[in-house]
Amino acid sequence: MTVPSDYERAVQTLDESLTGKLDKQILDPERADVGGQFSPDLGFAGSSTGSSNLLAQLALAYVTPESRYFEDDGILERVQRAAAFQRRVQRPSGLVDLHGANFDSPPDTAFAVSTIARVTRMVRDSDATGSDEVESALRPFLVDAAEGMADGGFHTANHRWVIVDAITKVHELYPREAFLKQIERYLAETIDLNEDGEYSERSHAIYTNIVNRHLIGASLALDRPALLDPVRRSLHSMMDLMDDDWAVVTAFSSRRDRDSETVPVRGAANFYYAARRDGDERLAAAANALLEKGGWDRGDVAMQLLSYFARHPEWRESNLSAGEREETFSREMADSGIWRLRDGGLSATVGTKTKNVVSLSYGNAKLAGLQVLSPYFGGEFRGGDIKFEDGGASVSVESSYWHEELPGYFDPLDRPVDWGELERNARSVDERPDFDVNVGVERVDRGLDVTVSATGGLSRVPFVVEARFQSGGTLSFDGATLPAPQDDPIFHESGTLYYRNGDDAISIGPGFSNHRCSDPPGADESGGLVRVLLTDWSPMERTISIRGGSWFDLAGPEPPVGPSTGFVE
């Protein structure tokens, strides 16, 4: 049996994805949204991503000779209806809406335009019967939309580069001086990539992939190879932040993917393009893995790949090399505040600006985060400054409170105060000392030794070290094994506790449990995670051994239980 080439697989994915969408296109001529893609959440056809992707897939399949829908008259009719829908939903500005959020929206228009314009270029270059007719149907929407974007703005950091890509693609097709002027205004801000290769939103499950896709697109449409430099750095940084199973660290994201467990398959085509263009074996390994883990199931990835094959037709004759990534590395990411370790199946992260100061995984066993908690004046504790040490790192854990004058108590004003008012900012404060909390991490064989200390502050204040494991699996301790409970905490009193998922496991110990204060005000919602609590009183200094490995290799002699340095009730 002949194995299909990368190009053939991309065409197959396009066809399969489109086949699954055909019954979602509204064909009833009595409906106002005829031609669009029906959204069950909205109850009608939305005007941005869903319908624009459908239009692009219809048009691309129609002009692709290897597609089962090539020069299909029924598909051509659907293209016309979809294009007419996109035209009808444009506002006088040329822009479209994202229902439920943004209206008359340049950035949401950009998401639609970048997809449609990419395919329009391929339609223009096609010899398919009716390709001129297809381009004629798409052009009015694209030109008016680009004019609207050239006179508009944005909301979030990634929007800038989506808009740049969208306008550049239209400018490549239908040049306008106003288009180029707006492009240069955005690019003058410089790309928001730090020294460690992270974009400012740090959203590696979602928006990092979006930025890379659109910077590649802008680079090609503008013929500016320099725009690929941040893409390369970002892709390699993402690889540093991927575990052995290719799931990427999301603990530091400022967007909705924060703390998600995600293999970033939507970014597979970004890795593919950079790997083939540069002959980069490391990026090739990521591209192949992400495609096999779900990229080949996504129509948007297929369309992106096919656009690269259109610009590099010689790539159709061969496949991307298998590639290879290193088995072991340790990286200090000073600008991002991260220390990252990977050793075979073991991955670990120590970082700042997050409650999950330490995380560790081995295969299917994942410690999503190690947090420090205390009910002390309702404070929250997040990683602050990080210091890199030989074979490890140390993070000062900063406290924040519901009022900037805490910890303490507000003094009386000695005058009348209006009903319902406390005028806290006008009061002097009876202060209490804050804590110095530190998490020190040392790399050891098969894992980490983590030392948590809480000094200063007041004595006899309860502290909690919470280990938050992914749901599923079992817990084993004191000779017993039970399904790992979600939400309700387990107090780890002594010895070594094992979290096992399949043949993979993580051990943590020695346990200590000197109080039952399990949910301080600053604690995160459990989110269905498995919560293992180690509790003590201030002043506190505890060293916790965390190891990862196969269950049969890891379950061995328990580490010794040391005495508490704090108050025992």
Image: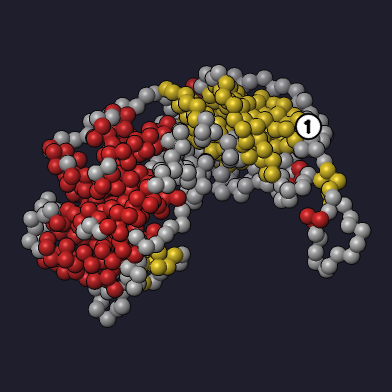
Of residue 162 and residue 521, the one placed in the foreground of this image is 162
Instruction: Give residue 293's quadrant in the image.
Output: top left
Residue lying at 51% horizontally and 47% vertically, measured from the top left: 254
Locate residue 301 relative to residue 482 in the image: left or right. left
Is residue 313 in sight in this rendering?
Answer: yes
Amino acid at circle 1: Gly
Q: Residue at x 67, y 30 (%)?
A: 438
| Quadrant where the image shows the C terminus | top right
x and y percent of residue 309 in the render? 18, 44
Q: Residue at x 19, y 60 (%)?
A: 59
- Of the pair 463 and 82, the residue shown nearer to us: 82
Query: Tag count in the figure?
Result: 1
Quadrant in the picture for residue 464 = top right
Display coloring: secondary structure
Residue 506 as seen in the image, left or right of residue 562:
left
Residue 417 in percent (x, y) is at 86, 64
In front of the other: 223 or 563: 223
Category of crowding for the residue at label 1, using alpha-carbon neighbours closer than 10 angstroms: few (below 14), some (14–19), many (at least 20): few
Circle 1 residue: 456
Q: Where's residue 422, x and y in %?
A: 81, 60
Please tell me whether mark 1 sits on a helix, a strand or a loop: strand
234 up-or-down from 100: above or below: above
Say which quarter of the image contains residue 507.
top right
Give the image location of residue 504, x and y in percent.
47, 30
Quarter of the picture containing the N terminus is top left
Residue name at image x 19 percent, y 35 percent: 319
Extreme residue toward the bottom, this view = 30
